[in-house]
Image (cartoon, rainbow, N blue to C red):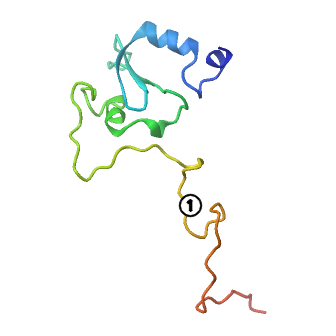
């Protein structure tokens, strides 16, 4: 309960949820459980503000491309009303995995558990000129 009051990085706080629930309406959610909202009335700029409430860790790369376009007013219709056509070559959306156990670690990296390949004969160490 206390984490819902004071921490915003594990989802929205109670105050944010109350404010969003009072001023906005739920538009939809994505496959990761994130929920998307749009304000009922336009702001001073003349357009309605749009929000995402993350399910878990608040990481912007967890927003799929179609919802990202809607959040930034690139698309007028949300993906629930007009889903983007999927191409055969497109891969499913994956969030940024940097800093996690699933991050890419190339061969020879110190973070990878393995031996680095030995240097070959084409390598010559640098030495400063006297």
Please, what secondary structure does the residue beneath circle 1 have?
A: loop
Question: 112 and 38: which one is in front?
Answer: 112
Residue 83, x across and y down, in percent:
23, 32
In the picture of the structure, the residue carrying the numbered disc 1 is 105
Q: Quadrant of residue 65?
A: top left
Q: Is residue 119 shown above or below 53?
A: below
* Residue at x 53% of width, y 15% of height: 16
Q: Residue furthest top?
A: 22
Query: Can residue 109 be seen at all in this image of the molecule?
Result: yes
Residue 130, x across and y down, in percent:
79, 93
Count of numbered marks: 1
Q: Quadrant of residue 74?
A: top left
* Residue at x 49% of width, y 46% of height: 96
Side of 104 where 25 appears, left or right:
left
* Residue at x 48% of width, y 27% of height: 54
Side of 38 where 57 appears, left or right:
right
**In what quadrant of the picture does the N terminus appear?**
top right
Residue 91, x across and y down, in percent:
32, 49
Side of 78 where 62 appears, left or right:
right
Query: Can residue 50 be seen at all in this image of the molecule?
Result: no
Q: Quadrant of residue 28?
A: top left
Side of 23 where 77 appears, left or right:
left
Residue 98, x across and y down, in percent:
55, 49
């Amino acid at each position: 309960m206390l984490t819902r009051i004071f921490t915003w990085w594990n989802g929205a706080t109670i105050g944010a949820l109350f404010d969003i629930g009072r001023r906005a309406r739920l538009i939809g959610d994505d496959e990761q459980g994130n929920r998307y909202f749009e304000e009922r009335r336009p702001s001073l700029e003349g357009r309605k503000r749009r929000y995402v409430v993350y399910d878990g860790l608040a990481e912007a790369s967890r927003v799929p491309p179609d919802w990202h376009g809607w959040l930034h007013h690139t698309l007028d219709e949300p993906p629930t009303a007009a889903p983007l056509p999927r191409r055969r070559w497109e891969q499913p959306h994956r969030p940024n995995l940097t800093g996690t156990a699933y991050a890419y670690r190339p061969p020879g990296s110190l973070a990878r558990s393995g031996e680095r390949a030995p240097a070959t004969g084409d390598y010559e160490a640098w030495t400063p000129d006297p």
